Image (cartoon, rainbow, N blue to C red):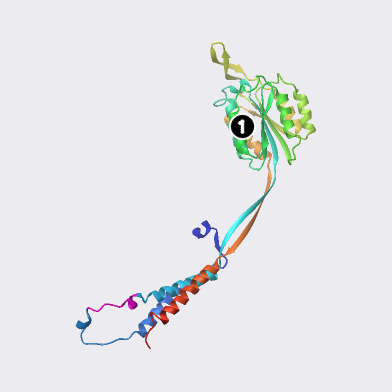
Amino acid sequence: MKFLERYHILLAQPYFLLLLLLLPLILWYFYREQKQRSVVFRISTTEGIKGIGKSWKVKWRPLLNVLRSIAFIAFVIALARPQKTNVSESIDSEGIDIVLSMDISGSMLAEDFKPNRLDAAKDNAIKFVDARATDRIGLVIFSGESFTQCPITIDHNVLKEQITAVKSGMLQDGTAIGDGLATAVNRLRDSKGKSKVIILMTDGINNLGKVGPELALEIAKAYHIKVYTIGIGTIGQALMPIPTPFGEKKEMVPVQIDEPLLKKIANETGGQYFRATGNSKLESIYQSIDKLEKTSVQVNAYKHYAELFFWFAFTGVVALVLEILLSLTVFRRLP
């Protein structure tokens, strides 16, 4: 049965295969009939015929039983109605349009995450994208300014390549939370998705940008966009690389995240605020958001059947006709 499943073949009436249990009885019947019809001569000695072998007709006569068996097996399989199946699927998805807005400022290189905050954020963003197969997702990056790294797309391979390519220093340094949120809103404002979601991640306090966080929040609310905010950074201090004229050095610096602002943005747009203090916590946050924003997917499967019984019936007829012709000609018995 595994062989049949492998080639997408099923039997419409498999119970007919029980007839194959009669095959040994049929073969026994033909064997007994042939034995009863055999002619026996009694002679006083076999010395004179020892060198005489069996003729080719005698040697090949069992071929008739083989043909009968093939015909019987083929007819039984034809009765079981083997069918080739082909399954096609139609997927109806009420997709969610999502924009990941990621802080890439210099402080994202802090090593309270392994290997650092930015790489941890990128790894978890890719895992999140892999879990959202039917959603359109885009990427916005920001530091002292903001930029659309990838418009919302269903081509997740391209998106993941863009996430992997993100590096700190691609934009002017600083933390422009308002710009990061406003650019993400701009990506979603004309979206036709069932739901529009932004996941905003930052590790600092707004200190630059053309659009203030309060104004960006009002714009998000006007377009009915839900914002999940993530503050990324340990509690207290974190080891951070600091560039100097003599090279890079690492120092412990205080972790400052504007949690009141991030909570306000999340609460007023219907989202939630999360604090990520380590790699495992950040991973669980993305998993929580994935569960909160479920996409409705309906899969309709259609099965198509192609009947194969004809080929077995044809094989059976050919074997039976060949057996009858041979028995009436080449292997004909004398009366």
| Residue carrying label 1 | 162
Query: Which span is picked out in magenta?
Result: 51-59
Left or right side of 44 for 334 = right
Which of the image's four quarters has the C terminus?
A: bottom left
* x then y, percent, for residue 299: 66, 51
User: Is 257 placed above or below 318 here?
Assistant: above
| Residue 52 located within the stretch drawn in magenta | yes
Residue 133 occupies quadrant = top right
User: Is 211 placed above or below 220 here?
Assistant: above
Residue 35 occupies quadrant = bottom left
Q: At numbered mark 1, what does the secondary structure look like: helix, strand or loop?
A: helix
Q: Amino acid at mark 1?
A: Gln
* x then y, percent, for residue 236: 61, 20
User: Is 93 placed above or below 184 here?
Assistant: below
Q: Residue at x 65, y 36 (%)?
A: 288
How many numbered dots are placed on residues in this image?
1
| Residue 8 located within the stretch drawn in magenta | no
134 and 329: which is toward the camera: 329
Residue 48 occupies quadrant = bottom left
316 and 90: which is toward the camera: 316
User: Is 327 placed above or below 228 here?
Assistant: below
Say few, some or many: other residues with alpha carbon within 10 Å of mark 1 (under 14 / 14 to 19 / 20 or more): some
Looking at the image, which residue sits at the far top? 245
* x then y, percent, for residue 208: 71, 19
Q: Residue at x 19, y 82 (%)?
A: 47
Left or right side of 36 for 82 = right
Can residue 16 be seen from the camera position used here?
A: no
Looking at the image, which residue sits at the far right? 222
Can residue 200 be seen from the camera position used here?
A: yes
* x then y, percent, for residue 161: 59, 33
Q: Residue at x 63, y 22 (%)?
A: 105
